[in-house]
């Protein structure tokens, strides 16, 4: 959400002209594709209509992101992220194609400036919400994380933070939770990190996810692709998962894919006001190998990011 | 010179560009960019300038640190040593003194860096780029009539891969997408490629001369040409129209993306230890030519050969300064750019040190129908 839009929204709430009973919640639809160098077939996503609005409210999508989230086990660990240039992608909607029926190398979709400062970039993704999320008094957020990098020998610290302003006071709020992971098992951050203990609703405007190694012999940062995350508001709102993902991903999204503001993912801003999905609407996303080197199968993660409008 | 805006007209992207290549001398130099009135608006339409792009052009390495002499042969060393003054002759100077090139405030246009992904098997600190992406957003509407089309051609580049070892895997390749409004999902596109990007066999075929490097031993790679704009690099108007043959009515274009895959090209230098710093993106050694073929002015958007990095203004390895207020070049108006170069003492590894700086003024021609 732009600064100007936030200002207008806040001014509107103070005049009670925007209290129309509509709540916004972020939504992320994500899937992953395993691509092998010997395969030139079209590779379709997981079964189950991942990129489809399965809820009873309209969804507005603003961003499409992609990154290599795994693979390369034969000679590269983790996979060389440049190999995203060797994977083509296309988007289908009722046999219409967005943008083209040809498979475009995924970096061609990158139309947003997202490079972060050098010292934060590798392990951090910043996501500005496209519509404000109201965290009412005594509400909290449930955040689940898992890192495939985390082992007893390499403990990983995951940090998830939200920032926003008070609905009445306009003061800034920062809510951040941290957890150390020693295995790849999904773990919930304590909801006390994110609880609104004040007397006014907090308007959340964005989220930052990062991952740092706390033991082992690696450097001071870890690429974020191995950390995955799920969110849910506890209290008001839909109380539904923000991330819709296949069962194989245990309903989490690779945190790199959330970096619509800054990070490493290819970030494509959807044209115009974005796409509106009414209930049941969606798209299908296909991939194709465009010349991956031998012995370098990769896993490409794709996410569509926006918000749901709940009345 | 004025700051007028034009509305209700047809717009086409334009850029006035030049690359100045000068051998260093022990004494400081002051030189003008003066190739064929490169910064003069020679058309009959006013051109609204929005961005100034600056970059070291045609270097093999972004920062090349020789073990014995420090960082002198990479683009960064050249860029940080130079200063420039921009003026309208006899009328306006945009700064009283020559500005350090970095003083033209850089915008956030850099693509993500690959340097954080190094491990014991890959040294991506020397890789050129993570995605090899360039993007130009059309901030003024670029509208083509129903059967309008655009021709896009890339030049060959100088600096083939090191002879031993041979280029593993694929030679550099390029792809392009023209982003278009309309369609069921509010957007459509015309995607071309990937096609092989050829390197120049002779410096005569390379638009900016031989690649500048502090190290010897670079030779032609495995895909070469003696043409500056080889036919394999051209996306013709026919290619363009074939992508959406059934489109009806005028089409509005939102932007142009180009992507250069140089993964294996980079890796061949890294494997041969042929350079000491990151390889430059090929977009800083490759020129381009774009013209509206049917509809619009049917003219080249800029003098053919503009370095890709200088004219793709939204995501690019070049430094981009966005003018707070657009500047309009009326027909016949001309800018003047003067470079100030410090003196340099030759060292044994390279007796001649070369400065090569590119600058472009990017904007839109406002065309009355």
Image: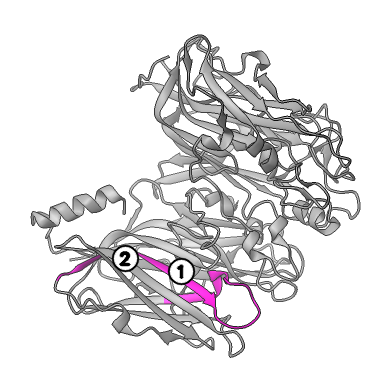
Whether residue A67 appears in magenta in the rendering, the answer is no
Q: Position of residue A72 (x, y in %)?
A: 68, 72
Q: Is there any visible trace of residue B194 in the rendered image?
A: no
Q: Is residue A172 above or below residue B135?
A: below
Q: Which of the pair B23/A300 is nearer the observer?
A: B23
Q: Quadrant of residue B282?
A: top right
Which residues are drawn in magenta?
A200-229
Residue at image location 81% in from the left, 46% down from the top:
B69
Q: Earlier in the sequence, mark 1 or mark 2?
A: 1
Task: Please report, as a chain letter, where disc 1 is located.
Answer: A
Residue at image location 66% in from the left, 61% down from the top:
A83
Provide the secondary structure element on which disc 1 rests. Answer: strand
Q: Which residue is mark 2?
A: A163
Whether residue A211 appears in magenta in the rendering, the answer is yes
Q: Position of residue B141 (x, y in %)?
A: 41, 31
- Badge 2: residue crowd in 10 Å (few <14, some 14–19, many ≥20): some
Q: Which residue is mark 1?
A: A30
């Amino acid at each position: 959400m732009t600064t100007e839009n936030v200002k207008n929204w806040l001014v509107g709430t103070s005049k009670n002209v925007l209290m129309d009973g509509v709540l916004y919640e972020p939504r992320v639809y994500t899937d992953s594709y395993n691509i092998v160098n010997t395969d030139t077939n079209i590779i379709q996503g997981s079964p189950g209509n991942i990129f489809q609005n399965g809820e009873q409210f309209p969804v507005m999508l603003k961003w499409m992101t992609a990154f290599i989230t795994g693979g390369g086990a034969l000679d590269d660990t983790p996979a060389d992220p440049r190999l995203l240039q060797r994977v083509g992608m296309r988007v289908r909607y009722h046999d219409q194609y967005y943008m083209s029926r040809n498979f475009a190398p995924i970096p061609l979709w990158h139309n947003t400036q997202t490079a972060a400062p050098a010292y934060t970039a590798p392990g951090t993704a910043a996501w500005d919400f496209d519509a404000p999320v109201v965290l009412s008094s005594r509400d909290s957020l449930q955040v689940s994380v898992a890192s495939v990098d985390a082992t007893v020998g390499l403990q990983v610290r995951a940090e998830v933070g939200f920032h926003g302003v008070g609905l009445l006071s306009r003061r800034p709020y920062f809510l951040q939770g941290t957890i150390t992971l020693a295995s790849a098992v999904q773990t919930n951050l304590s909801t006390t990190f994110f609880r609104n203990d004040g007397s006014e609703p907090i308007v959340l405007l964005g989220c930052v996810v990062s991952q740092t190694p706390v033991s082992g012999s690696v450097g001071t940062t870890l690429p974020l692709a191995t950390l995955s995350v799920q969110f849910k508001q506890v209290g008001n709102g839909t109380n539904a998962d923000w991330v819709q993902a296949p069962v194989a991903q245990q309903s989490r999204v690779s945190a790199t894919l959330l970096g619509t503001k800054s990070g490493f993912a290819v970030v494509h801003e959807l044209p115009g006001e974005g796409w509106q999905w009414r209930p049941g609407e969606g798209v299908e996303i296909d991939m194709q190998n465009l010349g991956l080197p031998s012995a370098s199968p990769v896993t490409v993660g794709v996410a569509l990011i926006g918000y749901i409008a709940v009345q | 010179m004025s700051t007028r805006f034009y509305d209700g007209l047809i717009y086409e992207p334009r850029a006035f560009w030049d690359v100045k290549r000068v051998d260093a001398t022990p004494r400081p130099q002051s030189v003008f960019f003066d190739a064929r009135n490169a910064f003069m608006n020679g058309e009959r339409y006013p051109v609204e300038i929005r961005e100034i792009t600056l970059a070291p052009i045609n270097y093999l390495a972004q920062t090349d640190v020789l073990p014995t002499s420090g960082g002198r042969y990479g683009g960064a060393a050249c860029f940080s040593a130079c200063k420039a003054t921009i003026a309208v002759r006899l009328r306006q100077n945009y700064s009283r003194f020559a500005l350090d090139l970095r003083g033209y405030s850089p915008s956030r246009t850099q693509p993500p860096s690959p340097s954080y992904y190094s491990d014991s098997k890959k040294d991506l600190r020397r890789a050129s780029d993570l995605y090899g992406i360039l993007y130009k957003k059309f901030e003024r509407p670029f509208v083509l009539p129903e059967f309008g089309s655009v021709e896009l051609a890339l030049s060959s580049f100088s600096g083939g891969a090191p002879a031993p070892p041979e280029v593993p895997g694929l030679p550099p390749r390029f792809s392009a997408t023209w982003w278009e409004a309309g369609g069921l999902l509010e957007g459509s596109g015309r995607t071309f490629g990937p096609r092989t990007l050829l390197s120049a066999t002779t410096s005569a075929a390379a638009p900016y001369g031989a690649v500048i490097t502090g190290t010897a031993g670079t030779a032609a790679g495995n895909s070469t040409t003696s043409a500056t704009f080889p036919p394999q690099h051209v996306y013709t108007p026919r290619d363009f129209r074939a992508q959406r043959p059934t489109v009806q009515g005028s089409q509005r274009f939102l932007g142009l993306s180009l992507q250069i895959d140089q993964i294996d090209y980079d890796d061949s230098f890294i494997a041969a230890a042929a350079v000491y710093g990151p390889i430059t993106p090929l977009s800083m050694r490759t020129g381009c030519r774009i013209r509206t073929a049917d509809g619009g002015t049917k003219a080249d958007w800029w003098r053919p050969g503009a370095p890709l990095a200088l004219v793709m203004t939204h995501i690019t390895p070049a430094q981009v300064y966005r003018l707070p207020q657009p500047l309009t070049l009326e027909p016949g108006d001309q800018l003047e750019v003067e470079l100030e170069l410090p003196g340099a003492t030759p060292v044994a590894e390279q007796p001649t040190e070369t400065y090569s700086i590119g600058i472009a003024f990017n904007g839109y021609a406002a065309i009355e129908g």
